[in-house]
Every structure is written in structure tokens, then in C-alpha cells.
Image (cartoon, rainbow, N blue to C red):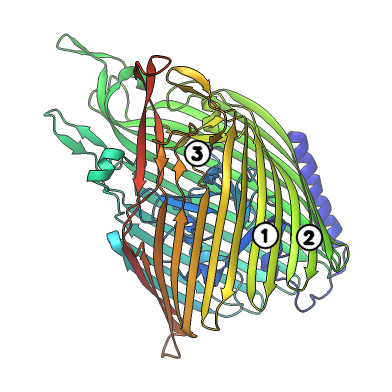
Amino acid sequence: MKRLSFYFTCFLLSINSWAQEKQKDSIPEGMEKLDEVLVKSVRVDADSPITHSNLSKEEIAERNLGQDIPILLNYLPGVVTASDAGAGVGYTYIRVRGSDASRVNVTLNGIPFNDAESQGTFWVNLPDFASSVENLQLQRGVGTSTNGSGAFGASLNLLTDAVSEVANAEISNSFGSFGTRRHNVKFSTGLMNDHFEVAGRLSAIASDGYIDRASSDLKSYFLQGSFVDENTLIKAVTFGGHEITYQSWFGIDAATLETDRTFNPAGAGQYTDEDGNTRFYDNEVDNYKQDHYQLHWNQKYSSHWSTNLGLNYTYGRGFFEQYKEDEDFADYDFTPIVIGGETINTTDLIRRRWLDNDFYVINATANYKNSNLDIDFGGFYSHYDGDHFGEVIWAQNAGGSEIRDNYYFGNGTKNEFTIFGKTTYRINDQWSAFVDLQGRFVDYETSGLTSDRVPLEVDETYDFFNPKVGATFQINDGNQLYASYARANREPRRSDFENGINTAERLNDIEIGWRFNRKKIEVNTNLYYMWYRDQLVLTGALDDVGAPIRATSGESYRLGIEIDANIPVSNKFMIKPNIALSTNKNKDFFATVDGALTNLGSTDISYSPNIVAGNILVYQPQKNLQLSFLSKFVGEQHLSNLDNNDLKLDSFFVNDFNIVYELRDIPVFKSIVITGLINNIFDMKYESNGYSFSLGEIADDQSPTGLRTQYFTGFYPQAGINFLVGATLKF
């Protein structure tokens, strides 16, 4: 890895040395904006043989009232979302083609956002980030080469606010059900002296949550300084957030679901006092801060050549706090104490489990483009250093410990080097070819103890080669066909190593698609076949911090068809339907059932609905008024890989109503935008997420083994009818 780092540094120096020798030409009118080049290396264009969807700043703003980015993406094809607190604020989740968020590669301005160890994306750490997004692209399947952990269900890349030529400011406030409110202010100086811009945002979001005691207190910021001239864009960007979220990560069981849908067994530390009364600890919270610092330098040297250099530092730190009853002294390295002749070796206590991590990135790309050829090549290097430790901040019986003694400490370091080259070649007016080759090299080491005080010593190296090829055929002005093949490899995450898994996963993905675009009608249809080797599927069980546990499934596949469209019925009425039909199977799946290891044969992959459908009806009676009716159907989902029909999430069908009205030509303001959103307008009771695990075996004379496995199921209820309404004052 050190040798690769040296080569990468030489590569960067050679790019800049070569670039300085190139003659600077003026930028022809109509060439792509300098801002867009920041994400060009991880994005694809409209004609690429990669299945994708785009969302613009304006489309995001229509429903942006404080809910997290996964919720705002809910109506894209193949997407399923969930919220712990039930109303889209706090911890939220996204699945694409049945793959959970840890398998969706996310980049912010080309910089990985997925946590290097857990591979998860925690949008709660960047509340209201949607208000600083210029546009985004969701690539389904493997997609094109990107930075960070490989995409095993999708990749999502976001571009933050573009440089504004004109000074502007806005103030936004929104309020809604469950005490939800969002307040933010944004500004831009516009270009000063035709070259410099400073822009920023401050946001505060709070919500009590639909679930009891599942409140959120979220704050975030965004600040960028930019220099731009005819051929140069330099951006210094910093953004971050601080979240304090009462936990609701354990859901509720089926019986409670029927009698008390909003009950929260975790989010307030339920315990029993000395008199046998049920109490709730009032500070069972997740308290985490994350700050990102990015520097981007994009340089155009001619009408054909450009380069981009990106630097990043991310600092994350925080803890979750819990009240625990009757904990053994041995689990915390306490010394037993004797009181009145009785040995005391258990205690009630309050503990914090900490994460403290640093993430460094250097990313460099170069692009050559002419009328027939578009070549991107570059390299990426990252270093992650994360501490995991626990401390006891109070104990009823301290056992000789000192306040905030660490009862476990572990460290993880991860180094990653990637080099890639991708080319699109226009063969003639009808045919174009796409080739994308990536080498990815990962070193991961751990030391110390896990939170269960078990030694975790990992020293693994993974070398991956990820080829991708495709072709596009332009039948005529309105019809286009494409096909692609892509391979992705992916290393295990920290929790997999804790469970004894060190085998990398492999995915092969074939996509075949048809795009129709004529007379403002757009239809995108694609077939996909994704087959996996050693896929890590969700078992349905959770660990003691509510994170999903995974297991290797051997051979498995996902086969499906996705269709989405934009159909203007008239100049005032638009229909935007989409549907994803799929079958998702494990082959020869082994599991312990009724006390015996059993080959269950072909089983459904957990959390993978066979149908996901959405629709948006848009009516715009006048230029400044838009009414939208949004619908989403998600088929039933297995909570395990056992094909046990008792371990399922029911299908659900929900509908939202959105209104956007803009007041223009008024004193003081450029405009006032009033936005309203009614979620789940028909007040449907549904659960979008859940879990299950074995409780062990009981005797059963009807079972061939004489035993029957009992299971527990948990559910995360989502809110019934609820609303958000807001106003944005633009100056």
C-alpha cells in the first residue's frame, strides 16, 4: 500500500506538471459548466449504457421541508425507504433493488460519504443537506466506477451548490406534525470582481417523532468560497452537522403493534427501579458530530483537456448513551465489592459507546474530450483511522472504577487506493462504445476489543479488478438501445469480521435497456440480471445497537425489469409513473432450522420486494402553482432468508399530496415560495421495515427433529396522515 501511495503521488505531480505545459484556450460556448466537472468522473451522461435517474435542485426543492435525503428519493424506480421515528426525520434508510444503504455507494462532490468501516450512510449526520444540493444522480446496479466501497445495489452521487453569479439570500421555515420544524438561512455574495463567491447555509431541524420519545435535535452548516475565471474553478467547501437523536432502533413486536403502535422500548431506556416501577431513562440518545472539509481545483487547459484535484478531511466523533440494568462487573472490568458480608458483582449503570474517526482523501482525474472520444482517467487514495471505545459515566456500584474509565478500546485503520480509466467512443452516428476499468486495493487492520470485550485482530488485504463494458445504439431520433456488463467486488465491513466473515463478495451485473424520447414523452425500460458470489445478505437479526447482522449466502441473484416515464397529457398535466418487478433468490441456502442444519434450496432474499411501483401526477394550472399527487406501492418483504411466511412485512400503498405556490413581483422579496406536503393522505397503517431472529428451539412432536424453532419479529411503524408546510423568502 505504501508503494501504491508513492505511485499515486507521482501520478498527481505528473498530471499537474503536464497540465502547466498545455496552452489555455477559451471555453467555447455551450461546454459543460466547471461545477459539473467536479462529479464527472463518477457520473454518466444521458446516452451512457448505465441505468440511472437524475434529480435537479428544483425537483428536490418541491418536497424539501426537512425530511432526509432518502425520503426525498422515495419515488425513484426501485427505491424503498424507512424511518426509525416514523416521519422521515432522524435516522432514515434507503434500499435500492433490495440492497440496503451500506451497499449503496454515496459520494459528495466525488468524495465517499459511506463510513469506511461500517459502509453505512448516516444522513442524520448531515441534516438538511438537500438544501445545499445542486443535483444528484442515482445509478442502479453496479453503475460506473466510483470512489469508496463498491456499489452492490446502486450508487448515488451528489453535487453541492454551484457558483452563483448573482447575489441572493433566502430564509426558510417549515412546521408540521409531531412538533416538526425546520429553519434555515442561505446566502450567496454572487461573483465579486467577476471571480470570487462566498455562499453558505445554517439549518436547525427538530421533531418529536411519530414514535414515542424518538425526538431529533439536528443542526447543520454549509459554507463555500469559490474562485472562478474562464478556465479555472477552485472551491473550498466545508459542511457538517450535529445530531442528538433519541433512539428508536428496536421497533416493537407484533402484539404491541396491534395495541400501541407508537410505543418505544429503546428510545428512553426502559428499566425497573428498586420498588419494581417501570422507569424511563431520559437521555438514551445518539449524540454525534461530523465535519467535512473539501478543496476542489478544476482546470481547463484547452477545448479538449481538463483536470480535477480534490482533497478531503472528515472528522467524526460522538457516542450513544444507555441505561443498563443488572450488568455484570466482569463485562466492565469492575472489581467485586463486599458490603455487609455480601459480594456485589452486578450493578445498574449508564454507559457511552464512542466513535472517534478521521478520514483523509486525495482524488485526481483528467479528461480528454473531442467530438467522438471522451476519456476519463485518474486515481483515488484514502486513509481512515477510527477509535471505538466505551466508558461508564455512572454506576450504582462502581466496583473501584474511575469515572469515564474505558471498559473497551479498539481501533480500525483502512487504506484504499483506486486507479481507473473510462472511455466513451462514438463509432458513428448510431453506435457508441463504453469501457471502464478499475483497480481497487484495500488494506484493513484492527486491534483491541469489540464492545463485547472480545479481541478483534484483523489484517486483511483485498485486490479487486472491476471491468465494465457497454454499447449504445441510436435507432432514430427518439429511440435508443443500450447494453452493459459490469463486475464489482466488495470487502466485508467491521461487523462482518466480528462475526467471523472475511470473504469478499463479487457481483456481475448485466443491464439491457431501451430509452424513448419524443414529443416530450420519455420512457426508460431496462432489464437486469445481477448474480452474486458470497453475497452478504441481511439475516433479519439486529445486534445490540440496532445494526443489521449479515451472513454469506453463497450463490444468489436478482432478476428484474424497471420502467419509468414522463408523459405530458397536456401543457398543464404530467404523469410520472415507474415500476420495478423482480425476483430475488438465494441458491442452495443453508440455515439451522428446528435444530438441524438444513439446505432450504432456493429462497427469497430478505428485504427484497418483488414489486415496487410509484407514480406522480403533476397538475400546473398556472406558471406559479403546482399540485402533485404521489403514490407508492411496495410488495411484501421477507424478514429473513428462510421463506418463512410468518416472518414478513406486509405490502403497503401510501399516497402523498404536494403543493408549491410562488408569489412573485412583490415588494422587498424576489419571491415567496409556499410549500405544503400531506404525507399518507389516506391514513394507512403500515410498517416499512422490520427484523426477526431465532429465540431457540422448543420441543415439538410434529417436527422430524423433535424440535421447533421459535422466532421473534419486530416492526417499525410509520406515521399515519401527517403534514408539513413551509415558506421560503427569497431576496
Q: Is residue 323 above or below residue 382?
A: above
- x, y (%) of residue 514? 70, 61
Quarter of the rendering occupied by the N terminus:
top right
Question: Is 306 situated above or below 285?
Answer: below
Residue 476: percent from left, percent from top: 79, 71
Quadrant of the rendered image containing residue 66: bottom left
- Residue tagged by mark 1? 39
Q: Which residue is mark 3?
A: 606
The answer to whether marks 2 and 3 mark residues whose Cβ atoms lie closer than 8 Å is no
Mark nearest the camera among 2 and 1 is: 2
Mark 2 lies on residue: 472
Say which label, 2 or 3, has the lower sequence index: 2
Which is nearer the N-term, disc 3 or disc 1?
A: 1
- Residue at 60% in and 47% down: 153
- Disc 3 residue type? Ser
Please tell me which residue is depicted at 84% across the width and 73% down the height of the picture.
25
Circles 3, 1 touching at the beta carbon (< 8 Å): no
Q: Is residue 142 visible?
A: no
At which x and y percent is residue 638?
Answer: 46, 39
